[in-house]
Image: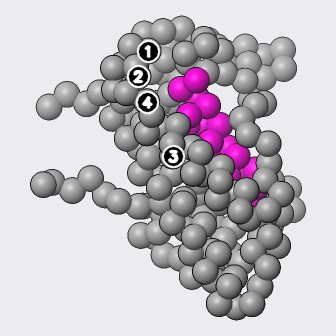
Amino acid sequence: MAISLYDVTVGQYLQIVDAAAGFLERGLKHCTDEGANPDDLVGKRLAGDMLPLSFQIASIHHHSIGAIEGVKAGVFSATGGPSMAETYAELQKTIADTQAALRALTAEEVEALAGKDVTFEFGAMKMPFTAEGFLLSFSLPNFYFHASTAYDVLRANGVPLGKRYFLGALKLKS
């Protein structure tokens, strides 16, 4: 069986974005159960020199549906994506919007991107890629980094999460 560009990008994005929706829901439940304000989590960081939960969630969006949109346009910028959430509800909306946008993509639409040139731009730096090279060597690693960091911020702040909450729905043999 051949693996398609759609499967290795959108399929992976959806598995983890759906998981992010779940661990954010679990974070909200934890705050409700503890009588804590979930908005207090929005600015939490793992370390002082790391960006907050709101940035991690915006980056999940930016490095998934934003990466696909960048490939379509032929350019992806380090800046862009949704604005950083100021409330926990906005974090959840960013993830819901990401889920909807990813689900709206068709396999044919993503497969048509194969071989397309895309440039990553960061200030004056420009890095040329093919769609596959960009999505697999840049977008996916960044996506996983920010999803893991969002999970870790919640876990470090008392939300009871285990690995299964990060992994989401596995693609089991039917």
Instruction: Identify the secondary structure beneath mark 1.
Output: loop
The Cα atoms of the two marked residues, 3 and 1, are separated by 20 Å
Q: Quadrant of the C terminus?
A: bottom left
Is residue 21 on the magenta stretch? no
Q: CB atoms at circles 4 and 2 under 8 Å apart?
A: yes
Q: Quadrant of residue 122?
A: top right
Q: Nearer the viewer, mark 1 or mark 4?
A: 4
Give the labeled residue for mark 2: 110
Residue 61 lies, with reference to residue 66, above or below; the image says below
In the image, what residue type sits under mark 3? Gln
Give the labeled residue for mark 3: 99
The Cα atoms of the two marked residues, 2 and 1, are separated by 5 Å
The Cα atoms of the two marked residues, 4 and 2, are separated by 7 Å
Give the labeled residue for mark 1: 113
Q: Few, some or many C-alpha atoms within 10 Å of disc 4 (few <14, some 14-19, many ≥20)?
A: some
Mark 3 or 1 closer to N-term? 3
**Would residue 164 be found to the left or right of residue 149 on screen?**
left
Whether residue 146 appears in this view of the structure is: no
The Cα atoms of the two marked residues, 1 and 4, are separated by 12 Å
Q: Few, some or many C-alpha atoms within 10 Å of disc 1 (few <14, some 14-19, many ≥20)?
A: some
Q: CB atoms at circles 4 and 3 under 8 Å apart?
A: no
Residue at 71% over, 62% down: 89
Q: CB atoms at circles 2 and 1 under 8 Å apart?
A: yes
Mark 2 or 3 closer to N-term? 3
Is residue 60 on the magenta stretch? yes
- Range of magenta residues: 53-69
